[in-house]
Amino acid sequence: MSTEHGRGMVMAAAVSGLMAMALPASAQAPIPGTESWAVTLSPYVWFSGMSGEISVPAGSVDFSASFGDIFQTLKFSMMGLAEARRGNLSIVMDTLYLNLQQGVPVPGSHGAFSGGSVRTQSAEISAIGLYTLTEAPSGRLELGGGLRGWWFNTALTYSPGLLPGRSTDSTTSWVDPIFAARGVLRLTDSLSFTAYGDVGGFGVGSQFTWQAMGTLDWRVNERLSASIGYRHIHIDYSKGRAEIGIDLSGPIIGASYRF
């Protein structure tokens, strides 16, 4: 087991342990089912930094960038979460898209190329099912699993100089099975803390991936709430000529509306 793999397992276990401790020993049986689904839409902004390495046929890029660095090269982004809940069952869909472009050193010398740039597009979509194991006035604990898909496109372009310009690009995509846990600790009538963690990959898609997130949630009214917290995702993928090792982490803020 690699050091990174072991660190991810320890982190996931710690998150699950914290969620379990958030619930009292007297937690009763799961809440009874209801006849209708409650749907919550949650757009969010993730102020994520990014570090790691991407090696694909189009080229290799090593990087370490704060959110400020990424914001300067960001062309477009989209993030959002949707959840449908009925009784003990929740189905969570999460989407993320980033389109980044930045300059890169030009190989060779003597003006062979006048400039160079790399554009990296990445997209993630998750579908997770969670089942409430215990529910009490002070909180609840949910366990489940699902799938998370990733898509990466890297395009490397050199502008014309003494030599004609050239451009290469490559696309890599995969789907990971995931085991997940979520715990909610109600602090007051309007304030609560949510902890979420998952692990997956196991060589089916990526070699290993894990995620941990914690948010402080404020219920404005029966339908509207706001959240602030921190999120980290690790990806370790290696198949054929594509190798992707990435860590994304940073503060996250969002709002939720319940229908």
Image (cartoon, rainbow, N blue to C red):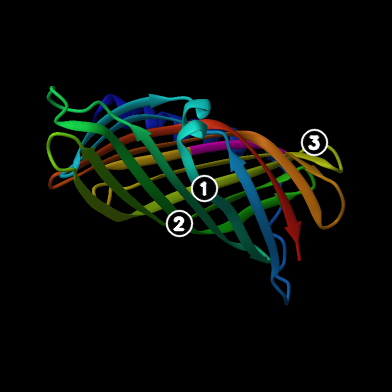
Look at 48% across and 39% down and name the residue there.
74
Disc 2 designates what residue? 125
**Rendered-image quadrant of the N terminus:** top left
Identify the amino acid type marked 3: Leu
User: Quick check: is 214 in the magenta stretch?
Assistant: yes
Q: Is residue 164 left or right of residue 77?
A: left
Q: Main secondary structure of the magenta part?
A: strand
Is 224 on the left-hand or right-hand side of 146?
right
Asked if the residue under mark 3 is in contact with the one under mark 1, i.e. CB atoms within 8 Å, the reply is no
Residue 116 located left or right of residue 177? left
Cα–Cα span, label 1 and label 3: 33 Å
For mark 1, give the secondary structure: strand
Residue 13 on the magenta span: no
| Earlier-in-chain disc, 1 versus 2 | 1
In this rendered view, identify the residue nearer to me: 214 or 138.
214
**In the rendered structure, which amino acid carries the disc numbered 2?**
Ile
Front residue (pair 109, 198): 109
Residue type at mark 1?
Answer: Ser
Q: Which residue is mark 3?
A: 187
Instruction: Please say whether residue 91 is visible from this viewpoint.
Output: yes
- Picture residue at 24% right of the left edge, 28% below the top: 2
Residue 24 in view of the camera: no
Q: Which residues are magenta?
A: 212-216
Say the numbered circle drawn on residue 77.
1
Q: Which residue is more in the foreground, 50 or 83?
A: 50
